Image (cartoon, rainbow, N blue to C red):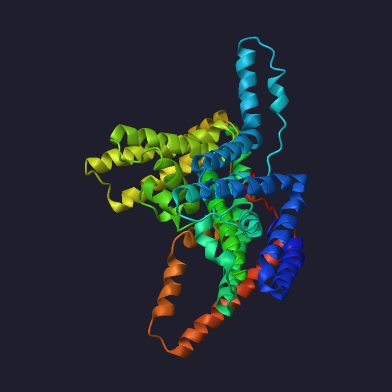
Amino acid sequence: MLFTSPIFLFLFLPLVLLIYFLTPKKLKNLTLLVFSLVFYTWGENELVLLIMLSASVDYFSGLIISYGKRKLGLYISIVFNISILLYFKYANFISSNLVQVLESFNMNPENALNFSNVVLPLGISFYTFQTMSYTIDVYRGHVKASKNFIDFATYVTLFPQLIAGPIVRYAVIEKELKNRSVSSKMFYDGVEHFIIGLSKKMIIANNCALLADGVFNLAPSESSAMIAWLGIIAYSFQIYFDFSGYSDMAIGLGKMFGFNFPENFNFPYISKSIKEFWRRWHITLSTWFRDYLYISLGGNRQGKWRTYTNLIIVFFITGLWHGANWTFVVWGLFHGTFLIIERVLENKNLKLPVVFSHVYVILILNISWVFFRSNTMNDAFNYISTMFNFSLETNTAFLSFYLTKELLFILVIAFVFSTPIYKKLSHYIHNSKLFTGTKNVFLSLKLIGLFILLLICFTYIATDSYNPFIYFRF
């Protein structure tokens, strides 16, 4: 069930909110748990049993740790979660690579093909990392083990962030699981977050996707440097507004039910280094890898070469986490390599001027997104070669078909809202010494703007517009 589907917007969400606010305080978590399981079962059917199994294993692992069997509980949790990830997410990848190896040695690949049709459960990368963070935090003494299975299962299955994050640590919402309330301001903030996220997705991301998909589906002979750059720029906007839009909707829904989920994006395209980019992009994932993998490997405490090795390991796994394909692995290693280069230059006190730093980051990011978007390494290299082959003639028929006035306007809007201009303006108005009447005018304009955005989104939904979520497959 998509957040952008009519059945969610006009049936499921209103019904959940109505029943939730009518439910006695002691039963609110149970209500959320039941509806979250319905939400997941809607698209995944019997695979809902897997997420409940995951919640059960990690719940009892936490209890085992709290009873003094610390390493046993931790190992059970990590081995179980890594095992189901390896099987459900990477079995096909391992199988296909094993088949290629066996065939190269003229060996029968029949047994390897037995693992080539495993179904990927939605959200498995997110909820396994979320539950592992819980048991690791219990092991480290950062949180106490939950003694209430309903509360813990609610934490694991919360439908707002179940499918594509943000990755919410138990410590962040532990108190809210036990005791929370929803003020009118908090509910309004939630609705605002949700509308903005829905607009990012329906108005910007989906329109950018039409251009990006059109370009990536072109044969190299029909493309050109100009078209290739337009395609990857459109994709960079698509993936940002798609994923940050989903995160905003998840955060907004959380607020409607009294939860404060962490922000997941902070205008990553204004970064002046790849290091800064990863402080702004998919923040809950990057901090997860920092706190639970990078630091556990030794971080930067054991010399520069060990630091570089740790970075390569972390970004190899970061790439693999995003998808079972060598293109994702290369994407991750590409970022890891430039993080090392930046660290080397930083140690030598070498810095680029600010303008060149921005240009460098945008260039690297756009090249890296080619690997992320491409189906094969060969497709990625062909696309990159087209980006830098300025001798090719531009396919004017293609541009005239795709570059409509509406799409050009969307690209401009995407550029503007990928920067903190709106946020700074809103902050200035809110904290300025303007007259109350003037502030009320701005507030009224904001409410009207949100209402118009919602109507536009409903129009796109009613026309059954192109509507995938990129990160659902991860």
- The answer to whether 243 is drawn above or below residue 367 in the figure is below
Residue 124 x/y as whole percent: 63, 44
Residue 280 x/y as whole percent: 43, 54
Q: Which quarter of the figure is the C terminus placed in?
A: top right
Numbered label tally: 0
Left or right of residue 453, residue 230 in this image: left
Q: Could one spot residue 201 in this view of the protein?
A: yes
- The answer to whether 389 is drawn above or below residue 215 in the figure is above
Name the outermost residue toward the left.
Answer: 349
Q: Which quarter of the figure is the N terminus placed in?
A: bottom right
Q: Quick one: 144 or 13, which is closer to the camera?
A: 144
Q: Could one spot residue 373 in this view of the protein?
A: no
Residue 220 appears in which quarter of the rendering?
top right
- The answer to whether 78 is drawn above or below residue 209 in the figure is above
Left or right of residue 74, residue 350 in this image: left
> At 48% from the left edge and 90% from the top edge, which residue is drawn?
437
Q: Quick one: 427 or 249, which is closer to the camera?
A: 249
Residue 423 x/y as whole percent: 45, 68
> At 61% from the left edge and 48% from the top edge, which residue is drawn?
60
Residue 153 appears in which quarter of the rendering?
bottom right
Name the outermost residue toward the front.
Answer: 67
Residue 151 x/y as whole percent: 63, 60
